[in-house]
Image: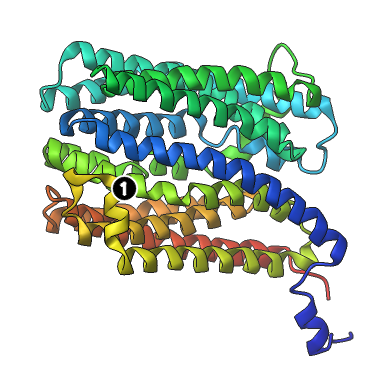
Amino acid sequence: MSIPSPAIARRSWFPNRERTRFWLGKISHFGAWQLASQGIQLITGFLLVRWLSIEAYAQYGVALGFQNMLNLLVDLGFSSSIIALVGDRIHDREVIGRHIRTARSFRNTMLVTIGPLSAIGFFWLARTHHWPLTGSLLLFSSILGFLFFQGWTACYTPPLLMHLQLTRLYRPGVILNAGKLLACAVLHLLSALGAAAVCWLNALAAIATALLYRSSARPYLNEPPSPDPETTRAIRRYIAPLIPGMVFYAFQGQIQVFLISVFGQNQSIAEVTALGRLGQLFIFLGSFNGTIVAPYIARAPIAQLALRYTQAISLTVILAALLCAAAFLFPATFLWLLGPKYHGLRVELFLSLIAASLAFLSSTLYTFNNARQWVYHWTGMANIIGLILLQTALIATMNLSTTINVMRFSIATALYPIIVFVATALYGYRKNPAPA
């Protein structure tokens, strides 16, 4: 067996010229659309922090937390299974169509099951904080509308990703988000902007996005009228190890808002939600990993996998660390984005970005592991059991009615999954080692 020289080993970190030109073109294309999309979302998010009253922003924060939680529970990884199970058969329209039809069927079933049950928890929280019944009904109905059409968006996105159709993927979101920002501005000028209005604008944008994605994905698939039994079994086998973790993380991802909603008042709910807006600074990086890097990791030859995986994770850590350093050195800049109602949250700001950075690293590891089908029952159980024990101890010993303690809680609970996902990656790679 020959051993490569150190010079060759060093050069292996850099792609050849053809690959460099190809990926620079895709990355620049992605960057232009994603920057436009994220820029509009960031502007809208921070303007809403300024425009909405404390009570209205608290209502919006709780509604958004429920919406994000239910979106994970309804999906359970059905849409993300499409890329992993299709693999290199991206030009087989029948295969892609069968997987999309089956994934949509699973999502619809989950929505019908979970939707009515979730109403109990939402209206209990609304009553606890004495929110008007009419406004609460408008908020929850917007959540249900968003979830149904988000299922279309989630299932028709994979064909566009697999064929790197970035313009078709991002143009609808950019245009619709710009329209939503304009509508919010008009309602603000008319003194008619509230939590329900913002949530319904989100739902209407989701409907339009779903219709456009479905139309754009049509050339890449032949969707059957009903789910295919073989494909149904394949998705079930893929999803089975993920279900415990997905269910748990559906709640875990919104635990900040839920804890402060139970233990705190409207002011604290609004502060936690506003600080959570700063986590949107990672949207570009997360989208880049999911759109560009994850498909690349999924089809990387096993001989190059360790190197490519390490490169991607190293870049993730460096970028997250730089953002945290900027928040520590220039907190006033970040607090200016939130507006005068939140100017006193200097320490909370830094803690919030640390927690967001750790969550971003954890989600990146999870995405890459799923792309390689490194999904095991023990991963989900280790996460669930360990985090439940950790969170139980923290809830019993911390005063979670304050914003700063909720941020500390988030940092502690964001560290643990990273350990588990790193162990999963090492285990998955050792099962498929690179040839000598």
Left or right: 390 in relation to 126:
right
Q: Position of residue 138 (x, y in %)?
A: 29, 14
Q: Residues within 10 Å of mark 1 (few under 14, many from 20)?
A: many
- Seen from the viewer's position, the closer of residues 72 and 336 is 336
Question: What quarter of the picture does the C terminus occupy?
Answer: bottom right
Q: Kindly indicate the quadrant of the structure image that contains residue 115.
A: top left
Task: Work out whether 281 lies above or below 264.
Answer: below
The residue sitting at 10% across, 22% down in the picture is 130
Q: How is the image coloured?
A: rainbow
Q: What residue sits right under mark 1 in the picture?
A: 337
Residue 427 visible to the viewer = yes
Left or right: 380 in relation to 228:
left
Q: Kindly indicate the quadrant of the structure image that contains residue 107.
A: top right
Question: What quarter of the picture does the N terminus occupy?
Answer: bottom right
Task: Work out whether 202 lies above or below 61.
Answer: above
Task: Work out whether 38 lies above or below 155.
Answer: below
- Seen from the viewer's position, the closer of residues 352 and 246 is 352
Secondary structure at numbered mark 1: helix
Q: Position of residue 273 (x, y in %)?
A: 27, 41
The residue sitting at 63% across, 30% down in the picture is 171
Q: Position of residue 93 (x, y in %)?
A: 82, 26
The residue sitting at 21% across, 20% down in the picture is 123
Q: Kindly indicate the quadrant of the structure image that contains residue 311.
A: bottom right
Q: How many marks?
A: 1
Residue 111 visible to the viewer = no
Which amino acid type is shown beneath numbered disc 1? Answer: Leu
Q: Position of residue 2 (x, y in %)?
A: 89, 86
Task: Work out whether 211 lies above or below 35.
Answer: above
